[in-house]
Image: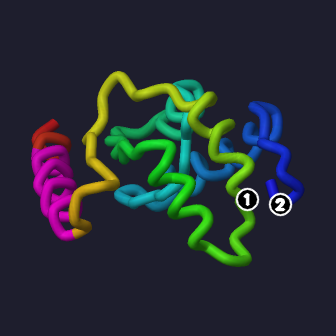
Amino acid sequence: MIAGIPLDDGDRASWLAALNAELLQRAPAVLACSALKQIYRDQLAEGLSIRFVWIRLSRELALQRVAGRPGHFMPTSLVDSQFETAEIPREAIFLSAAEPLEESVRRCTRALGSFLTDTQAL
């Protein structure tokens, strides 16, 4: 990605398997990663009771935020490839990157609290 070349499914396969193995060892846990495709989320979730959070943002806001990260591994030239790859999840907690952070945290915490309560009842 530093070279401006997006990762492909093959590049991600061993990384997703390693993350799933870690999650299986550490559950309950929180993992932050892009997991843009449903197949990536399926790999991460294998063997787990899991909840995804999808943060919606516009291309313009993504470009602005990436450009504001000097020295970050992902160049702005890859933003379009991220939007082309992204598959909106079937089920997720949906947040907006444009809303105040405190509101996103409050809504996410409430939704995850319900999920944890429901999971513990199983």
Q: What is the crowding at mark 1: few (fewer than 14 residues within 10 Å), some, or many (at least 20)?
A: some
Q: Taking 87 as reference, is 11 above or below it? A: below
Magenta span: 102-117
Residue occupying the point 74% across, 37% down: 13
In the rendered image of this protein, does residue 14 appear above or below residue 85? below
Name the residue tied to disc 2.
Answer: 2
Marker count (numbered): 2
For badge 2, the amino acid type reads Ile
**Disc 1 vs disc 2: Cβ atoms closer than 8 Å?**
yes
Percent of width and height locating residue 33: 54, 53
Residue 75: give its label. 1
Residue plotted at (50% across, 26% down):
87
Of discs 1 and 2, which sits in the foreground? 1
Instruction: Name which quarter of the figure residue 37 lies in.
Output: top right
Q: Is residue 87 toward the left or the right of residue 114 in the image?
A: right
Give the quarter of the figure containing the C terminus. top left
Residue 52 location (% of width, % of height) = 36, 42
Q: Label 2: few (<14), some or many (≥20) within 10 Å?
A: few
Q: Amino acid at mark 1?
A: Pro
The image shows residue 122, relative to residue 88, as above or below, that is below
Point out the image quarter for the N terminus.
bottom right
User: Which tag, 1 or 2, sits closer to the chain's start?
Assistant: 2
- Identity of the residue drawn at 36% across and 43% down: 56
The prevailing secondary structure element of the residues shown in magenta is: helix
